[in-house]
Amino acid sequence: MTGSLTLPMLGLILFCVIAETAREVCFKQSASGNAPLSALAKPVTWLGIVLWVVELFAWTAVLEHVPLTIAFPLMALSYVIIVFAGAVIFKENINLRHATGVFLVTAGVVCVGVTGL
């Protein structure tokens, strides 16, 4: 692969990060306090599935143009954003050890992003 990280591809990766975050929030919302089969009856579950499919196509487009060694570490931003979404939306706790891990993932993503540009 001879591709590189261009601004449009970076934008598509960020779209994938946001779609993945939204998908996980949808699945968490639909799973709250219910049996797995009853979650299938909720629209938020199906929204999560639609986001999953859309992200699949966007991610495939990214992988056509950007080396996996650059694209995949940038997707780790979803781990960071999902932690904050859990804290804000679901009032989940973030302790110091958890926050340190999020910081280290972010630092790694920055290192990869800088080398990919």
Image (spheres, rainbow, N blue to C red):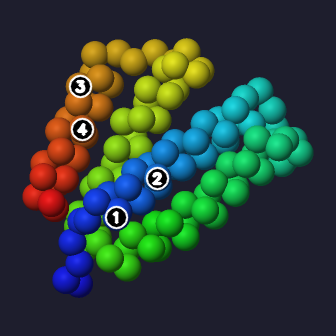
x, y percent for residue 42: 84, 41
Real-space Cα separation, disc 2 to disc 3, in angstroms: 25 Å
Real-space Cα separation, disc 4 to disc 3, in angstroms: 10 Å
- Element at badge 2? helix
Q: Is residue 79 visible?
A: yes
Of circles 2 and 3, which is in front?
Answer: 2
Q: Residue at x 45, y 73 (%)?
A: 61
Q: Earlier in the sequence, mark 2 or mark 3?
A: 2
Q: In the rendered structure, which amino acid carries the disc numbered 4?
A: Thr
Of 2 and 102, nearer the camera is 2
Q: Residue at x 58, y 42 (%)?
A: 22
| Residue placed under numbered mark 2 in the picture | 15
x, y percent for residue 87: 49, 20
Work out which quarter of the rendered image holds the C terminus and state it.
Answer: bottom left
Real-space Cα separation, disc 1 to disc 3, in angstroms: 29 Å
- Element at badge 4? helix
Q: Which mark is residue 100?
A: 3
Real-space Cα separation, disc 1 to disc 2, in angstroms: 10 Å
Q: In the rendered structure, which amino acid carries the disc numbered 3?
A: Thr
Q: Earlier in the sequence, mark 1 or mark 4?
A: 1
Q: Is residue 60 left or right of residue 49?
A: left
x, y percent for residue 91: 55, 15
- Element at badge 1? helix
Q: Which mark is residue 106?
A: 4
Marks 3 and 2: in contact by CB < 8 Å?
no
